[in-house]
Image (tube, rainbow, N blue to C red):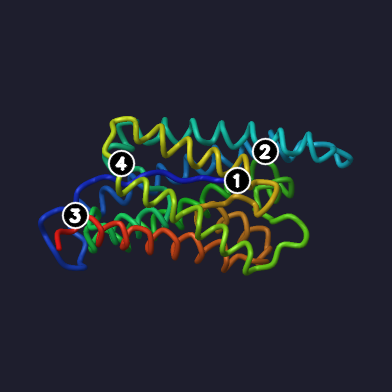
Amino acid sequence: MAVQTIAVRPAATATGLRPEPADLVTAAVEFLLTTAFMATVFGLVRWGIGTAAADAGPVELRLRVAVVSLAVGLVIVGFIVSGPGRFSGAHMNPAITLASFAAGRTPARRVLPYLVAQSAGSIAAAVLSRAAWGPAATSAVVQPAPGWSAGGVALVEAAVLAVIAAVMCRATTPYLPWIMGGLFGLQGAILGTVTGGSANPARQLGPALLAGDHRLLAVYLIAPIVGAVLAARLTRRRSEPA
């Protein structure tokens, strides 16, 4: 299932790697947003997909995944346009944070606090889900369909984030939150029953750690970041004057 958002806040004028107090405040808001967002996603997955009967057919499963993914897309839009979302940028996705940095839109000193906040938010949301549902919370772990190799999943995850990051860096429309939510929702609806449709390292981190399921964890963590950063760098180079 796909989860992620957008980063469009301009980089501050100060430079360096040491976070300023304001950066830590925004990172704290990012942690709260990520926790709330991931808990919402895990809940949607639990009730929309995890409750499917053991003998549910592929059509039913695809329909459930599509409905949940589109709902996640709408949730993404809501978080982006919310007050806290506008304050922190509502990244909630390490790949988006690093792509925004590569595009020159997020200062270097804010990157590490955001990555820590997003990772901690994912784990906190997974802990809350485990406390609420017990072993049933393992349904939130992303898994590809049988027959998919690590390389195949990595290629798809990287390509999806490359497209989304390129759109994020190029688009200037006020409807960008809706576009981003739509892209993440659409990719989840299409790929959810194929490669898992994670598209967000934080989406897999918490559930996988708590479930002890480390299969392809490195792929889901690294591939989206690689795709997003490469696309952001390429887009930035093409937009810079010769």
> Which residue is rendered at x = 35% and y = 55% of the image?
97
How busy is the neighbourhood of tag 4: few (under 14 within 10 Å), some, or many (20 plus)?
few
Q: N-terminal of the two: label 2 or label 4? A: 2
| Residue named by callout 3 | 21
Q: Which mark is residue 171?
A: 4
Instruction: Using the numbered discs, state the Cα–Cα distance from disc 1 to disc 2 in whole angstroms.
Output: 8 Å
**Residue at x 50%, y 42% (from the top left corner):** 184
How far is the residue under mark 1 from the one under mark 4?
A: 24 Å
Rendering coords of residue 165 (x, y %):
39, 52
Q: Nearer the viewer, residue 124 or 191?
A: 191
| Label 1 close to label 2 by CB (< 8 Å) | yes
Residue under label 2: 65
Which residue of the protein is positioned furthest toward the left in this rendering? 13
Sequence order check, earlier mark of 3 and 1: 1
Q: Position of residue 88 (x, y in %)?
A: 29, 44
- Name the quadrant containing residue 76: top left
Q: Amino acid at mark 2?
A: Val
Give the distance between the C-alpha atoms of the residues marked 4 and 3, in whole angstroms. Answer: 30 Å
What secondary structure is marked by label 3? helix
Alpha carbon of mark 2 to alpha carbon of mark 4: how far? Answer: 28 Å
Classify mark 2: helix, strand or loop: helix
Q: Is the Cβ of the residue at disc 3 closer than 8 Å to that at disc 1?
A: no
Q: Nearer the viewer, mark 2 or mark 4?
A: 4
Quadrant of res 173:
top left
Q: Which amino acid lies under the numbered mark 4 shown in the image of this protein? A: Ala
| Residue matched to label 1 | 1
Q: Nearer the viewer, mark 3 or mark 1?
A: 1
Give the Cα separation between the discs numbered 3 and 2. Answer: 41 Å
Q: Distance from label 3 to label 1 (Cα)?
A: 34 Å
